[in-house]
């Protein structure tokens, strides 16, 4: 999936949760992504956001620390 499409989808989730009580917004975004995005999608989101958070809504950026980061596959420690 392209970086633009990933940003769009993450921002759409944030747009939905913007209508929720403020104290539930960031947790809601993170919970949704953790439940419904497979590890490859989450890995791609982190790949994009590690490079730059430009284009991501502040709510998505804040939720990143609550989103489960998949372990890198194939890295020899």
Image (cartoon, rainbow, N blue to C red):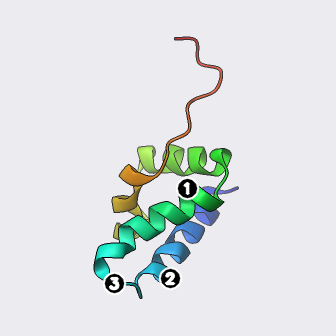
Q: How many marks?
A: 3
11 up-or-down from 15: above or below: above
**The one of 67 and 15 positioned closer to us in this rendering:** 67
**Residue shown at 55%/55% (left/top)?**
34
Q: CA distance from mark 2 to mark 1?
A: 16 Å
Sequence order check: which comes first, mark 2 or mark 1?
2
Q: Which mark is residue 16?
A: 2
Name the secondary structure under disc 2.
helix
Res. 34 mark: 1
At mark 1, the secondary structure is helix
Q: CA distance from mark 3 to mark 1?
A: 20 Å
Q: Which residue sits at x=64%, y=61%?
A: 36
The earlier-in-sequence mark between 3 and 2 is: 2
Residue 13 place in picture, x, y as percent: 53, 74
**With respect to residue 51, does 56 lie above or below?**
below
Q: Residue furthest right?
A: 1
Residue drawn 54% across the image and 52% down it: 45
Observer-side mark, 3 or 2, equals 3
Picture coordinates of residue 21 (x, y %)? 33, 84
Residue at label 3? Answer: 21
Q: Nearer the viewer, residue 23 or 63?
A: 23
How packed mark 3 is, by other alpha carbons closer than 10 Å (few <14, some 14-19, many 20 or more), is few
Q: Residue placed at 45% from the left, 50% from the top?
A: 49
Could you tell me which quadrant the N terminus lies in? bottom right
Pinpoint residue 77: horizontal percent, then vertical percent: 52, 11
Q: Is residue 16 left or right of residue 2?
A: left
Q: Earlier in the sequence, mark 3 or mark 1?
A: 3
């Amino acid at each position: 999936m392209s970086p633009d499409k990933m940003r769009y989808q993450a921002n759409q989730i944030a747009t939905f949760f913007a209508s929720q009580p403020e104290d539930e917004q960031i947790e809601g975004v993170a919970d949704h992504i953790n439940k419904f995005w497979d590890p490859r999608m989450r890995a791609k989101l982190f790949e994009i956001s590690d490079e730059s958070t430009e284009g991501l809504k502040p709510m998505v950026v804040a939720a990143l620390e609550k989103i489960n980061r998949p372990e890198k596959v194939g890295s020899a420690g």
